[in-house]
Structure formats: structure tokens, C-alpha cells
Image: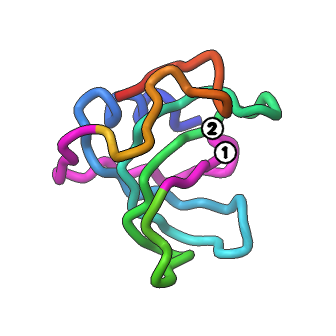
Amino acid sequence: MPQATLCNAIATKNIVRIYYTGDEAIGFRTVEPHMIAYNEAGHLSLSAWCLGGASETPESQGWREYLLSEISNVTVLQQRFFGPRAGYQRDGGKKYHNVQCAV
């Protein structure tokens, strides 16, 4: 499970490239990782701002949830992001609980 690598990237605010198999658009995504926490269904998830990738459409940028069990091939990029995106809730808000790591 890529949790430790992703938590380190969250702590240093590094952009990451992940391979995701949890939806119809299987493939790589480039994201700004913001939080790892449990979702409403009890699955450990990454909350991230998607910059682009396999699911690319004009609306591809934005908040996405990725199940950790469906993430592989995590590459931490040298590029950094500058902090939380609009709408971010460090405590997980109503959607997430038991936060493991967060920006």
C-alpha cells in the first residue's frame, strides 16, 4: 500500500503521479495529494486535486477521491504545490474521518 509514500508527499507538498484502477478510465493521474483518511464507506482514500491524466476532459481538474487499494506505481515528482486548494477541509469535513495525514 502506498500510504507512507503518499503521506510523505503530502507533508512536503510534492505533486505525485499515480496509477489508478478504481474507475473506467484506468491509467495514470497527476495529482496534488491533500489528505489520506477513511471515507464514508470506511475505505482508506486519498483526497487530491487532479491536475490531469487518464480521465482527462475539459473538467478533469478538480477534487477527486482515490481508493488506496486501487493505487499503484506512486512516483513523487520534484514539482511542489503551494498549499491547500479552495474547498479543502483539513479535518475531513463530513466526507472523511480518522485522518491519517493531511496538508
Q: Residue 37, labelled with which disc?
A: none
Q: Amino acid at mark 2?
A: Ser
Residue at the disc numbered 2: 45
Question: In this rendering, is residue 10 above or below 77?
Answer: above
Classed neighbour count for the residue bearing mark 1: other residues with Cα under 10 Å, few (<14), some (14–19), many (≥20): some
Which quadrant of the figure contains the C terminus? top left
Front position in the image: 87 or 78: 87
Q: Position of residue 3 (x, y in %)?
A: 51, 31
Please give the range of residues in magenta: 63-83
Q: Position of residue 34 (x, y in %)?
A: 41, 38
Asked whether residue 41 is drawn in magenta, I would say: no
Q: Is residue 34 above or below residue 100?
A: below
Sequence-wise first label, 2 or 1: 2
Quote the CA–CA distance across marks 2 and 1: 4 Å
Do tag 2 and tag 1 residues touch (Cβ < 8 Å)? yes
Is 58 placed left or right of 82 in the picture? right
Residue at the extreme bottom of the image, as rendered: 58
**In the image as oriented, which residue stretches furthest toward the right?**
41
21 sits left or right of 57 in the view: right
Place of residue 89 in the rendered image (x, y in percent of width and height, measured from the top left): 47, 30
Q: What is the quadrant of the N terminus in the image?
A: top right
- Depth check: give the residue in front, 67 or 76: 67
Q: Amino acid at mark 1?
A: Leu
* Residue under numbered circle 1: 67
Q: Residues within 10 Å of mark 2 (few under 14, many from 20)?
A: many
Residue at the image point whose x is 34% and y is 46% from the top: 85
Percent across and percent down for residue 12 are 23, 32
Q: Residue at x 46, y 61 (%)?
A: 62
